[in-house]
Image (cartoon, coloured by chain):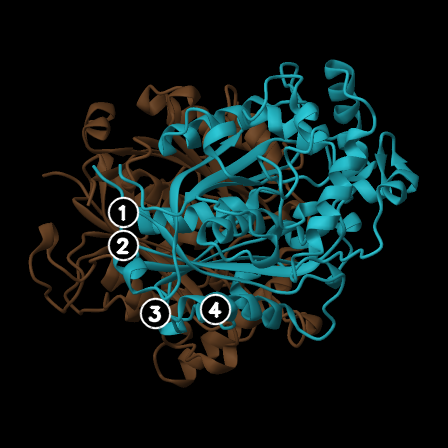
Chain colours: A cyan, B brown
Amino acid sequence: MSKEPVAVVGIGQTKHVAARHDVSLAGLVREAARRALDDAQLTWADIDAVVIGKAPDFFEGLMMPELYLADALGAVGKPMLRVHTAGSVGGSTALVAANLVAARVHRTVLTLAFEKQSESNAMWGLSLPVPFQQPLLAGAGGFFAPHVRAYMRRTGAPDTVGSLVAYKDRRNALKNPYAHLHENDITLEKVQASPMLWDPIRYSETCPSSDGACAMVLTDRTGAARAPHPAAWVHGGAMRSEPTLFAGKDFVSPQAGKDCAADVYRQAGITDPRRQIDAVEMYVPFSWYEPMWLENLGFAEEGEGWKLTESGVTALDGDLPVNPSGGVLSTNPIGASGMIRFAEAALQVRGQAGGHQVDGARTALGHAYGGGSQFFSMWLVGAGRPTT
Amino acid sequence: MREVAIVAFGQSDHVRDSAETSEVEMLMPVLHDVLAQTGLAARDIDFTCSGSSDYLAGRAFSFTMALDGVGAWPPISESHVEMDGAWALYEAWVKILTGEAETALVYAYGKSSPGDLREVLTRQLDPYYVAPLWPDSVALAALQAQALIDAGLTDARALAGIAARSRAAAGSNPHAQLRGEVPAGEVLVAPLRTGDCPPIGDGAAAVVLAAGDTARRLVDRPAWIRGLDHRIEAHSLGVRDLTDSPSTRLAAERAGAFELPHGLDGTGGAPMVDTVELHAPFTSQEVVLRRALKLDAPDSTVCINPSGGALAANPVMAAGLIRLGEAAARIHRGASDRALAHATSGPCLQQNLVAVLEGER
């Protein structure tokens, strides 16, 4: 049996900031959705179904927000699904929406992910006491720092690599009008001089806390033929999960991440990702995760990822640009961050990334992960329609 | 469209308080049950999808622990909806339709006992204008019930009859929380009496889906999903006619409930089904759903909620999936040839899902 090819024909984001006091939750999501519809030159009536995602409900203090947001997203009378797969949710949400088109259940689907972290306190949302479980009160940085240490010890990476990633991503963000952090006076020295939070992770090597939303319009071949702007075509997409805590888990390079990438490459006919992929939007909330994921995703041999970063290969003008948008390090509305990666990958192959466009990008990878490096979702998009 | 069937269904015993078991402990026997029914192991399943709610668990990312219970190693293809498990089943059904999966495991669970469910559910409401007033789920259902009574569509006696029928039916359901005779009880929020309201309870459920010949190989009589659709309505109660459920009617139409079996032309009349499992936590909501689904023909022989329905056990986040499972199980054992199953979400039936299931004759 054959799947319907899926095209991204509309993309919309909000300008991500620390606090959007000027809009409600409904206003925030509607802004991104309207921009995606405008990009596709479609109206609410053209949308057959809505798929929405975000990270935990406790971040805004609203249980199952799809119920309240149905009106704002033009979903009344339509199917509406709410996906939640922790930090990978933005990517998973896009994949669930893409499957609705691929399965020919619907022709045109609006997918959206958001987080309005200023409505509540994310640290509180993540720190509720759990029965039957050892409390882990170190925050996300405290959880990931030991795994970064393990990576450094395993590969012999010098302790300068993390700051190079942060400096690169924050400079890339200056070219992206939607990015949260616009640090015009950033220097490598400033990153290296920023306070140590969870050794070896410094303040400037961590993601901000943002309000923002990202939306995409996905459609079939007929819809793509009518679209006013070039489409990005989905060539492969997959999700993988593994347990959070067990003796065999490799926190430095989780098997689920490797398997997920392998599945996406198989679908897309990618045999040499380093050569065949032109741009990568990778989920890097702490700078050291760039070299770690470069290995996990097959762009570098084990132990070699930091060398790619150090040599400038992952810079905007490098051979394999990683996070031309500025990435999660510059913009992190948690539940939306994965979808922003997917959408930015699509913008690249549509040639519509503006100031942070990678010249001639034809194939791009969007990547997201969540939980304790437990959930992965990825898609590979291309400028051309898939042939198989 | 690819043929997909429910091939196994399992559920926990639903209880008022399961303080002695974690969610994972509650779920594990149910997962083992459905896998044993099909002879599949976790590693044989192509796609896994679950439904649950962080707000019931009282913590963020609560579903991650349940995944550990599934035994996701080697890594699995997996997703989660923050909704009733009926919508997890929908996502899994779509996944199989794409051809990327041949089998799927779907599960859902909810423990209401650790908190005050009526207060917890107020957090579903518009966070700026409504939730701060803490209108609870029973009060909102009572508004709907009063609207039905005012419109002359039901009365206290008819509602009591629905409660009595449901709980009598639950007498043969070993998993139900309330079984047999239950008095109408005191007024909880007028016009609803305790007998009109669901029990608050903890429980879990799981199903296995399979495509085409795989389904035929796994079980004698698969419950084929002939149609599956869901629709949402406006959130604000002020813009909805609470005596009607247009989203249920539309979902049923899209699922083919009003068409003759095997794709013949529509009858425009009552759905051609012998069994209906409605997710109506309140007696008054059954009245709304029966009207929307045209089940009130005077000569109707349709068997409604033979499991006892949500009035006998309503584990939040699993109760909708249980309706699909109960309907499928009747097909599995030959008690039904064509069944309609329904699930709901949100205050006063805001969001509704309808499935049409068939057994081969």
Q: Which residue is mark 4?
A: B348
Pick the residue in front: A65 or B38. Answer: A65
Q: Is residue A15 left or right of residue B159?
A: right
Q: Is residue A250 left or right of residue A259?
A: right
Indicate the secondary structure of the residue bearing disc 3: helix
Residue A221 bears which disc, if any? 2
**Position of residue B190 measured from the top left corner of the image (x, y, whole percent):** 55, 75
Labels 2 and 1 share a subunit:
yes
User: How far apart, in angstroms, are the residues tagged by discs 2 and 3?
Assistant: 15 Å
Q: Residues within 10 Å of mark 2 (few under 14, many from 20)?
A: some
Q: Which residue is mark 1?
A: A4
**Position of residue A119 measured from the top left corner of the image (x, y, whole percent):** 73, 63
User: How far apart, in angstroms, are the residues tagged by discs 4 and 2?
Assistant: 39 Å
Q: Amino acid at mark 4?
A: Cys
Q: Is residue A119 left or right of residue B78?
A: right
Q: Nearer the viewer, mark 2 or mark 1?
A: 2
Indicate the secondary structure of the residue bearing disc 1: loop
Q: Which residue is mark 3?
A: A46
Parent chain of label 4: B
Q: Nearer the viewer, mark 4 or mark 2?
A: 2
**Residue visible at 37% across and 64% down?**
B286
Residue B287 appears in the figure: no
Examine the rendered structure and indicate whether residue A97 appears above or below residue A215.
above
Examine the rendered structure and indicate whether residue B71 appears above or below residue B66.
above
Labels 4 and 2 share a subunit:
no
Instruction: Determine contact: label 3, label 1, CB under 8 Å.
Output: no
Q: Amino acid at mark 3?
A: Asp
Examine the rendered structure and indicate whether residue A351 appears above or below residue B28.
below
